[in-house]
Image (tube, rainbow, N blue to C red):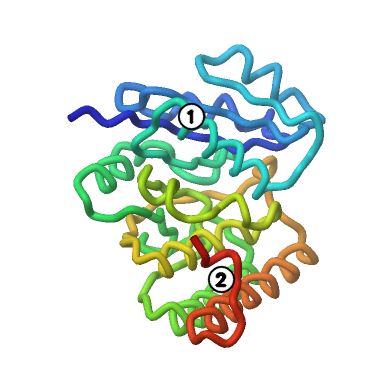
Amino acid sequence: MAFKSVVVMPAYNAAQTLLYTYSLIPKECVDEIILVDDGSADATIKIAESLDLRLIVHPHNAGYGANQKSCYMEALRIGADVVVMLHPDGQYDPLIVPQLLDAVRDGTGDMILASRFLVRGGPLQGGMPIYKFLANRSLTMVENMVSGLRLSEYHSGYRAYSRRLLETIPFLRNSNDFVFDQQMIFQAVHFGFRIHELPVETKYFEGASSISFKRSVAYGLSTLGVAARYLLHRYGIVGCSLFKE
C-alpha cells in the first residue's frame, strides 16, 4: 500500500532561509510540499512562488499555531498519510526527512520528534543560547514527570505525524501561539499514540527565526499551564476541551 508523504512548512518572514531549506529536502521521498505563509512582511511569498510547492497565504499574521492548523488541514485534504512539519528557518537538517517518514510508515510511532539532545554535543554545539538550553532542560524534566514519558526533549519544531493521529486529536482547539506544539504532545499522550524520537543536528545563526526572551518566558509559563491542565483533566478534577473527542 502506497503512503502519501507530505512536508509542511509554517513560514513567517523566512525569505533569508527558505530557498536553502527547500533545496535540502530529499524530493524523491516526498509527494508534496505545502508552505503556509503567515502574513510575512518580507519576500517569503515571492520566493515560495518560484518553488515547486503548494502555497497558502494567510492575509494577516495569525500566529504559529494557527499556521500549523492550516498546514495540517491542507495536508489532510489532499490525502496525506504521513506529514512532516519542517520549519523553513534553516535550523533543522532537512536531510533526515526520509527517516522521519519511515518511522511513521513502519509503525515505530504516530508522532516522531526530531531531538536536538540525542546528538553528541547537543544544541549548545549548534549555537543554542544558554538560557534556552536551561529552560528546555527544566521544562522537559517537568513534562516527563507529568506525562510519564522519558523523552529527551519536548520542544523540537521538527516532527512527523500519522494521518490517524491528526484525524483523532482535536488540534483545531489548540492555541494559535507557540504552545501549540506542547498541546499536540500532551494530546498524543492522552489519546494513547506512540511517540518516538530521532536525533537531528541543528544550527543557530543570524537570520534564523527566534523568539525573544520575553516571549520565551511566556512560552515556558504556557507550557507549564498545558501540563497542569492535562493533569487536572486526567484525574477528573477539571475537564479540558483539548483532551475531549
- What x and y, as percent, mark residue 232? 57, 83
Q: In percent of the image, x 42 and y 29: which residue is there?
A: 25
Q: Nearer the viewer, residue 65 or 121?
A: 65
Between label 2 and label 1, give the one nearer the viewer: 1
Q: Amino acid at mark 2?
A: Asn
Tell me what residue is drawn at x 54 percent, y 45 percent. Answer: 91
State the mark number for residue 136. 2
The part of the image, by quadrant, that contains residue 129 is bottom right
Q: Is 84 placed above or below 244 here?
A: above
- Give me the disc on residue 123: none
Q: In terms of sequence position, does the residue under pointer 2 or pointer 1 come before the other?
A: 1
Q: Is residue 109 left or right of residue 10?
A: left
Q: Give the residue displayed 22% in from the left and 51% down from the top.
A: 107
Q: Which mark is residue 77?
A: 1
Q: Is residue 124 above or below residue 165?
A: below
Label 1: which secondary element: helix
Give above or below for 29 relative to 107.
above
Camera-side residue: 184 or 87? 184
Q: In the rendered structure, which amino acid carries the disc numbered 1?
A: Arg
| 145 over 149 or under it: above or below | below
Q: Position of residue 4 (x, y in %)?
A: 32, 29
Q: Residue at x 62, y 69 (%)?
A: 130
